[in-house]
Amino acid sequence: MLLAIAGIAIVLRLASAFLQGNEVTELPGIYDQVSYDRLASRVVAGYGFSFAENHWPLTRAGEPTAHWSFLYTLYLAGIYALFGHQPVIARLLQAVIVGGLQTYLTYLIAEKTFSKTIGLIAAGISAIYIYFIYYGGALMTEPFYITAILWSLFLTMRIAETDDPKQDIKLGLGLGLAIAVTIILRQVFLLFIPFMFLWIWITRLRLRLRLPIVSTILTLGLVVLCVLPISLYNQYRFGRFVLLNTNSGYAFFWGNHPMYGTHFIPILPSETYLSLVPQELRNLDEAALDQALLKRGIQFVFDDPKRYLLLSLSRIPAYFVFWPSSDSGLLSNISRVSSFGVMFPFMLYGLFLSVRKKQMLDLLVSPSGLLILFTGMYTAVHLLTWALIRYRLPIDAVLIPFAAFSLLHVFEQITKRTPQYAPNLDSESSR
């Protein structure tokens, strides 16, 4: 059954990849694929991580950039080096990898959190979830990033319950690799790492298992080993420390600029964002500008904390939008309503069913507690910085097991209360 579901997921994503084709254009919600395509082509041509022309946000032609994920750029560059500039091959390979792995990981997480039956239902939802199908063929970090998050969360659940030293070592190394892949794809996941380890340690203590000292050291050590070469590479190119990417400063500055007042607008014209950058900072390189803008963005918060709070609250509709909008095209509205719009009520009901009648500590150290912790923390980060629908997609993936749980619950309640009209062949009246 699971194999069939994974097959359906792969076929649907392959169809999406074929439809998006060999051209790389600014389709709704996946504008960044143009940047990744151009950057990968430059890497293959021997120019390194740079653009041939002035590029978004304010990177000058020929100068180094760390604004985009190194790992995903190298994925594309590898495909282009082997097959020539054939974006459709990268799309198809990505569709197969993500279609299979994301479906399988969704099953594993839902099975560990609830049951095998719910795991199969969750895998089925993930397989046909339109957002995942659409992004499955897009040349962006989202498909691999969401899959890597699920991988990290599943291994976190495994480590929290094991008391076998050998398993501790294997799982610790596996989690280290999973986290490294995740943060190199999107560095925002870094903020959740302390919460992951806190959850592991509290769960081990609650279950009266040995403390995960070895696995913690191995995990963090492997993450450092994977990140260090990128940091050193950035230090060499920019002459200053850049851990992974140069995008957090831009995002925080633009996302919290006073020009919004207390009402956040998810997407503005590119020219509007660029006009907000102070003239005196425009001569800085990408890394220096990112750090300077981060300082300015933080100052916005200190200058008017009340406005910042109200602005953050105004991001809630932009983050959780599930209704059609006149600002969106037909494809976007269909994708939104038929995926998140349909599943969101079941996700919420599943969350309710999971937390009711449970003691707080028992809930916290359960697998569902980890998923809820991630959902809350990840949501808070984006409400405090910048909210877009595609930034919410990891939350969709993590909440799908709860949707599956509530769907099964609703089905059981309906079938339990439905009268049975089938004739009883053993009764007197049936003779």
Image (cartoon, rainbow, N blue to C red):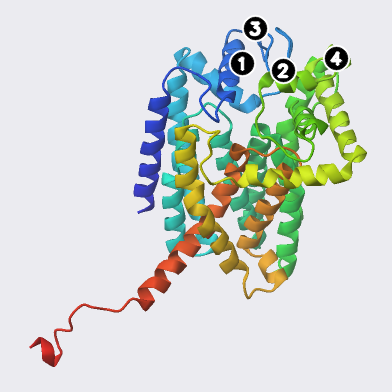
Residue 228's place in the image compared with 34, above or below, is: below
Give the quadrant of the N terminus: bottom left
Q: How far apart are marks 1 and 2 (CA)?
A: 9 Å
Instruction: Evaluate if marks 3 and 1 touch, with contact meaning CB atoms under 8 Å apart.
Output: no
Q: From the viewer's perspective, is 292 left or right of 153?
A: right
Identify residue for label 4: 279
Instruction: Evaluate if marks 2 and 4 touch, with contact meaning CB atoms under 8 Å apart.
Output: no
| Lower position in the chain sequence, tag 2 or tag 3 | 3
Instruction: Evaluate if marks 1 and 4 touch, with contact meaning CB atoms under 8 Å apart.
Output: no
Q: Does any portion of residue 210 appear in the rendered image? A: no
Q: Which residue is drawn at 86% across and 21% down?
A: 240
Q: Which amino acid does label 3 sit on?
A: Ala
Q: Distance between the residues labelled 4 and 3?
A: 23 Å
Q: What residue type is labelled 4?
A: Gln
Q: Residues within 10 Å of mark 1 (few under 14, many from 20)?
A: many
| Residue most extreme to the bottom | 428
Identify residue for label 1: 39
Q: Does any portion of residue 308 appear in the rendered image? A: yes
**How far across and how far down the image is residue 408, in percent?**
44, 65
The residue mark sitting in front, 2 or 4, is 4
Identify residue for label 2: 65
Instruction: Evaluate if marks 1 and 2 touch, with contact meaning CB atoms under 8 Å apart.
Output: yes
| Lower position in the chain sequence, tag 4 or tag 3 | 3
Local SS, label 2? loop
Q: Residue at x 81, y 46 (%)?
A: 309
Identify residue for label 3: 52
